[in-house]
Every structure is written in structure tokens, then in C-alpha cells.
Amino acid sequence: MLNGKVYLVHSPSLVQAVMRSKDISFDPLFLRFGQNVGGLSDKQMEIFKDPDVLKQFTDIIHSSLTANALESMIASGVVEVKTRLNGIPAGPGIEIPHVFKWVREVASKAAMRGLFGEKNVLDNADLEDLWYGHGGSIVPQTFRPCY
């Protein structure tokens, strides 16, 4: 951020005050996230920069983070994990050649099912593209395997 100020707030009561403040805007963070992590094109960014669209986006996020919505997402994700674990045949042991990829696939599919439900069209998507994009990374380096 070359033209702005960054403040770190560590106190829970101050965090609540900051979140209620009308003087502080998180819109620049949403916009940077959309472009850098979401991989939005310049044309998509122009649409996303519209204050009405950005407000609708934040309203959707806020409504998705209520207790009931989170409980429903977690329950759907747990069903996906349960289905995958129940699919493992009983026996003395199991061999998983790439544990990181297997855990990543299970976690990703559980998260997608939690977010989008049973009719999730992304369920069979190529997870490599979701994690690494087409030739470029959309996932921060922190989440990549270190092998």
C-alpha cells in the first residue's frame, strides 16, 4: 500500500470498534483479493469496482457467515468427508501414494460441497487447476507442499 495507511489492531474490543466504524473501508482489500487471488480480468474488475456490486458482494458474504449458514456448510462438508472415509476398504492397512494430494482433494471437495451443496458443479473439477490455475498460482505459496 503505497498511498494508504495500515493499522494492526490486536485488542478484541478495538477490533469490534473498527468493524463498526464508517470511516474505515475494507473495499480496497476486497478489490485486491478479487484481482490477485480470484484472478479477475480487468473487465470483471471494472464490474466489481461498482459500489453497488461490491455492497451486494459483502452482503452475501455477511449472510453466509451467520451461525445457521455456517452450521449448514460444516454439516455438508462433514458428509463429504464421511463419504470419502467410508469408501476406504476395511483391512490391515491402506496405502496412499500422495497423502498431501489426497487430503487436499478430500478437504477441497468437502469445502466445495459445504459452500455449494449437493448440486455443486465444481465437485468433479480438476483440483490442480483450482489450486494452481492455468499456468499461474491462485493459491498463496504458504499452502503449497514443501516436498
Image (cartoon, rainbow, N blue to C red):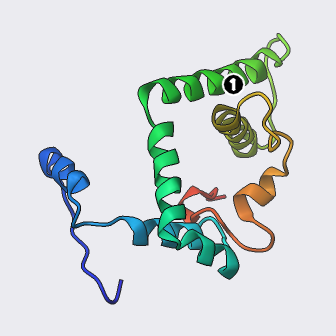
In the rendered view, does 16 fall on the left or right side of 109?
A: left
Instruction: Residue under label 1, please give it.
Output: 81
Return the x and y of residue 63 as percentages of the image width and height: 47, 39
Which residue of the protein is positioned furthest toward the bottom in this rendering? 2
Return the x and y of residue 43 as percentages of the image width and height: 69, 79
The residue lying toward the viewer, choosing from 2 and 135, is 2
| Residue 40 lies in quadrant | bottom right
Q: Indicate whether 145 appears above or below 43.
A: above
The residue lying toward the viewer, choosing from 123 and 95, is 123
Q: Indicate whether 146 appears above or below 73.
A: below
The residue under label 1 is which amino acid type? Val
Quadrant where the C terminus lies? bottom right
The residue lying toward the viewer, choosing from 121 and 146, is 121
Mark 1: which secondary structure? helix
Q: Indicate whether 27 appears above or below 80.
A: below
Return the x and y of residue 7 as percentages of the image width and height: 21, 69
Residue depicted at 85% across the width and 51% down the height: 126
Residue depicted at 79% across the width and 59% down the height: 129
